[in-house]
Image (tube, rainbow, N blue to C red):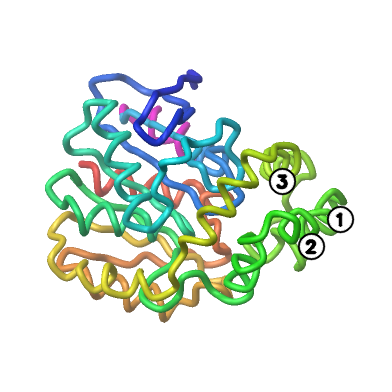
Amino acid sequence: MTNRSVELPQGEIRYRESGPNSGTPIVFVHGLLVDGSIWSNVADRISAEGLRSIVPTWPLGAHVEPMRSSADWTLAGLGEMVLSFLDAMKLDDAVLVGSDTGGAIVQAVAAASPERVRALTLTNCDAFDTFPPFPFNLQLHAFRHEPLGRLLMLPMRSATLRNSRLGFGPLTSRRLSPSESAAWIAPYRNSGAVRRDLAAYARSWDAASLKPISLQMRSVLAPTSLCWGTDDKLFPVSLGRRLADTFPNGSLRLVHGAGALVSLDAPEAVADSITACAS
């Protein structure tokens, strides 16, 4: 994959790209405190199938370049950021792929500009009143205050704690390596500007803002595939079923043995869902 960056009105976004330029563009949106690396195995698979993979690292706590002070951190504002990225990349009909908080952002994009979306693939993600699930809603309250957020992250220097049930452990069914989770938290731990960005997002976060957007998915006609891990207590299968039923052209694929980050636990299933939507 080739490392690149693009300047948006909100700030610089770094991304990785692979696959032919002539292929259907697939744009990935991850969640909080992870980066684009969660999609690497998926992107490799679909690029080999002739699709164009575009994997940004969005400013959700694991980014390197801080955003401008004028950036809008509301859910609608993050949706506009994705649309600005599509504009900068000259993409009019991309397939959007979302996970975790990224799934909420993808829904915001589809609600605001359904004509810009060729298809959607969502793995376990926020929807309706689940924005985010417990206990991450409590963590967001803490991240509103930079000193408290920094204190909260101090124990995460230990790989054992970081990958346990107190850290990223609940997100996957497989064991994370110390290096992959260390890369996710390094920007927040090492950069005051990144901490300020995440605090700005946390202060702008409104738990009630997603439900009306999720309900708007009733009018989104783009083919939508939900690839939902069943070994996930954060985003239960019942939430996936409800969300899939909301899309007029939605389908649900259950991935047994996968946790919330299905792209890490079962990348082949996510790649298959994207390929089916993009065809």
Q: What stretch is highlighted in magenta?
A: 41-50
The chief SS type of the magenta part is helix
- Whichever of callouts 2 and 3 sits on the residue coming sooner in the sequence is 2
Residue under the point 56% across and 44% down: 38
| In magenta segment, residue 102 | no
Classify residue 251 as left or right of residue 206. Answer: left
Give the amino acid at mark 2.
Ser
Earlier in the chain: of badge 3 and badge 1, it is 1
Which residue shows up at 25% across the image and 48% down it? 277
Give SS at disc 3.
helix
Helix, strand or loop under label 1? helix
Q: Which residue is drawn at 48% across and 48% down?
A: 30
How many neighbours does mark 1 have within 10 angstroms: few (below 14), some (14-19), or many (20 or more)? some
User: Which of the 4 image quarters holds residue 63?
Assistant: top right
In the picture, measured across the screen, residue 53 lies left or right of residue 133, that is left
Figure quadrant of the C terminus: top left
Q: Do the residues labelled 1 and 2 touch (CB within 8 Å)?
A: yes
Residue 166 x, y percent position in the rendering = 77, 67
Q: How crowded is mark 2: few (under 14 residues within 10 Å), some or many (20 or more)?
A: some
Q: Disc 1 residue type?
A: Thr
Inspect the magenta stretch and tell me whether residue 42 lies in it: yes
- Residue named by callout 1: 160
